Image: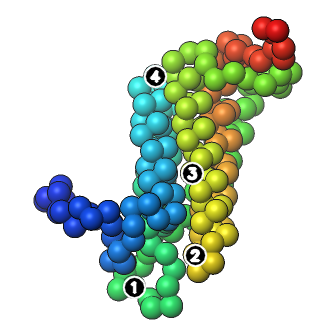
């Protein structure tokens, strides 16, 4: 468990931060940017929860906890020197739970005939915002994984990919199972 007695430490005043293993990195480092965007996603999910019905709220609550796990995973890069503790990693069962939740929500939703504009109900709009931020986190994680000397686990990448899928389906569920979706009409305002 984490104990925070002091919020400010002044150790980041020169633009660096510590990874979980104590390694200092620039606050502009791609790894820091990646787990920072995961944190931003988590804040968006928290906002969406303020408008979610109980079943969806429970799913989103589990996701918020997973996103802290994902942040810990990304903040602890694998190393040749084993740490003094077991690093927290995203595991296949977390991805499988997202898939099961996607399937459960999607079961009552009619197939799409057009792209969906972000909006509809307040819950759906907030979920669309969370979806777009999670997609940015995924793009950053993919870029990090492609960087020489950096490693991102396959499960972390899968989780981010499924998360944006979940948030899209959840937005449709929040729009009366798609009935209140706002559909894109190509060229409508020409």
Position of the N terminus, as image quadrant, is bottom left
Left/right placement of residue 34 relative to residue 190 reads left
Percent position of residue 117, x then y: 69, 21
Question: Closer to us: mark 2 or mark 4?
Answer: 2
Left/right placement of residue 9 relative to residue 125 reads left
Q: Earlier in the sequence, mark 4 or mark 1?
A: 4
Q: Which mark is residue 83?
A: 1
Taking the spot 22% from the left edge, 67% from the top edge, the residue there is 11
- Do labels 3 and 2 touch, CB within 8 Å? no
Q: Residues within 10 Å of mark 3 (few under 14, many from 20)?
A: many
Q: For residue 152, what is the image quadrant? A: bottom right
Q: CA distance from mark 3 to mark 2?
A: 16 Å
Classify mark 3: helix, strand or loop: helix
Q: CA distance from mark 2 to mark 1?
A: 17 Å
Q: Residues within 10 Å of mark 2 (few under 14, many from 20)?
A: some
Classify mark 1: helix, strand or loop: loop
Q: CA distance from mark 4 to mark 1?
A: 41 Å
Q: Earlier in the sequence, mark 2 or mark 4?
A: 4
């Amino acid at each position: 468990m984490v104990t925070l007695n002091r919020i400010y430490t002044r150790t980041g005043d020169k633009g660096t931060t510590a990874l979980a293993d104590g390694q200092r990195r620039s606050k502009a480092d791609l790894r820091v940017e990646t787990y920072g965007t995961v944190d931003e996603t988590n804040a968006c999910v928290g906002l969406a929860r303020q408008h979610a019905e109980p079943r969806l709220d429970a799913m989103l609550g589990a996701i918020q906890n997973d996103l802290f796990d994902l942040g810990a995973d990304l903040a602890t890069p694998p190393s040749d020197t084993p740490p003094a503790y077991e690093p927290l990693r995203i595991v296949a069962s977390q991805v499988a739970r997202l898939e099961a939740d996607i399937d459960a929500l999607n079961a009552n939703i009619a197939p799409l005939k057009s792209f969906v504009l972000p909006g509809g109900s307040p819950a759906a709009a907030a979920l669309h915002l969370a979806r777009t931020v999670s997609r940015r986190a995924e793009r950053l994680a993919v870029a990090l994984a492609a960087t020489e000397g950096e490693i991102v686990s396959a499960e972390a990448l899968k989780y981010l990919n499924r998360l944006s899928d979940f948030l899209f389906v959840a937005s449709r569920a929040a729009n009366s199972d798609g009935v209140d979706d706002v559909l894109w009409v190509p060229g409508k305002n020409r």
